[in-house]
Amino acid sequence: MDTENLKIQIKTFFGLEEILAEEIKKLGGTNVEVKNRAVNCEGDLGFLYKVNYSARTALKVLVPVLTFKAWDENRFYDKLFDFPWEEYMTVDQTFAIDTTIYSERFSHSQFMAQKMKDAIVDYFKFKYNKRPSVDTQDPNIKIHLHIDRELVTVSLDSSGDALFKRGYRKEQGEAPLNEVLASGMLQLAGWDGKGNFLDPMCGSGTLLIEAAMIAMDLPAQTFRRRFGFQNWLNYDAELFTTIKEVRLNRVREFTGKIVGYDIDSDMLHAARVNIESAEMDDVIEVKHQDFFESKKDLFPLMMVFNPPYDERIVINDDEFYSKIGDTFKKNYPNTLAWLISSDLDSLKRVGLRPSRKIKLYNGKLECRFMQYEMYEGTKKIHKLEGREGDSEPDQTPQN
């Protein structure tokens, strides 16, 4: 493997590609190219470690090692059997394969993964008279198989577990927000740690913790124990230690306030456990507070939240979203507020025209991430009221 000029593909969620591309550029990636749910780039081994450790909107960091065209299963097997696998793993290491397939010719992902496993095992058996083992739960080496029609790409997964698994979440609620999505939302909203932050329906605290990590410039994987690249044959432990030290030395003091409200005591308990796990209990405050009975007490203030919507938690949606709008207008003047929801009809009940709306996905749910700007004074509020029906194009990154 050429460790000076690695071609790298970094996976993310739909709608976060441009945010990830900016992160990659800041971390030193070159030839950055935005794709659908992914960003391609180039960098050296140090960059590979940096992007795994620091990028907030990265889900997986893949390094392609083999690309070929296959028209049938025999050619697929032969090309994999002919590959020098001992350059990337030993016969004593365990491995696992995950697959992404868009092909009529090779439509069964489990079958293709099994065929690939056979080729790798047969290769080692032929060359060393010994078979490596598959471990789907905790493999030493994770391999990603991507088939697009007849084009086959085999990549090493340098991350191991997906990068939304930050390592701080000990408790989760009924419908926890994915950490990568949470961080992407905060960056789309423009949160940079200047001012104060409120999540008025904080659940188990993911947005609060991600907001604090951004505010302090704390690397995304500060609490993570292991990465896939640490099992690679070319792993440079000294280089990775240096990168972590340099990155942690850039952590800054945060002087604002990060506050979360919730009315569910169990959720508040979960949030406190997670906040303590992230060592943020001196930075984040959570309160048993009904947002609809709250008033703005932090200046300046950004608000980002993930209210319950019908697929997640049963509520009376129309009344609930109407109360969100009323609370915005009456109690939070001069505030920038963002919320995400998949309930597009109920969003109209907010009664304010959004100044931005961005299409995102929360799991498989298609959502809108909405920005509302509240102004002091009834004239501006009335001007904004009742205009939700106006045409407002979705703002989604162009791929």
Image (cartoon, helix red, strand yellow):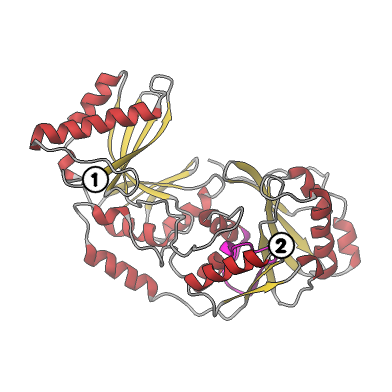
Percent across and percent down for residue 161 are 38, 51
Q: Is residue 197 above or below residue 366?
A: below
Q: Is residue 307 left or right of residue 81?
A: right
Percent across and percent down for residue 127 are 9, 35
| Residue farthest to the front, as pictured | 266
Q: Is residue 229 left or right of residue 355?
A: left
Q: Residue at x 25, y 19 (%)?
A: 74
Percent across and percent down for residue 21 are 47, 52
Q: Which mark is residue 94?
A: 1
Q: Which mark is residue 17?
A: none
Viewer-proximal residue among 294 and 399 = 294
Image quarter of residue 237:
bottom left
Indicate yes or no whether the magenta region holds residue 202: yes
Q: Is residue 129 left or right of residue 188?
A: left
SS of the residue under disc 2: strand
Label 2: few (<14), some or many (≥20) within 10 Å?
many
Q: Report which residue position mark 2 lands on.
A: 337
Give amino acid for label 2: Ala
The Cα–Cα distance between marks 1 and 2, rounded to whole angstroms, is: 47 Å
**Is residue 237 visible in this depiction of the protein?**
yes
| Residue farthest to the left, as pictured | 128
Which secondary structure is most common in the magenta stretch? loop
Image quarter of residue 144:
top left
Q: Is residue 373 left or right of residue 199?
A: right
Q: Is residue 93 above or below residue 288?
A: above
Q: Is residue 213 above or below residue 14?
A: below
Mark 1 and mark 2 residues within 8 Å of each other at the beta carbon: no
Q: How many marks?
A: 2
**Which residue range is magenta in the image?**
189-208
Indicate yes or no whether the magenta region holds residue 285: no
Give amino acid for label 1: Thr
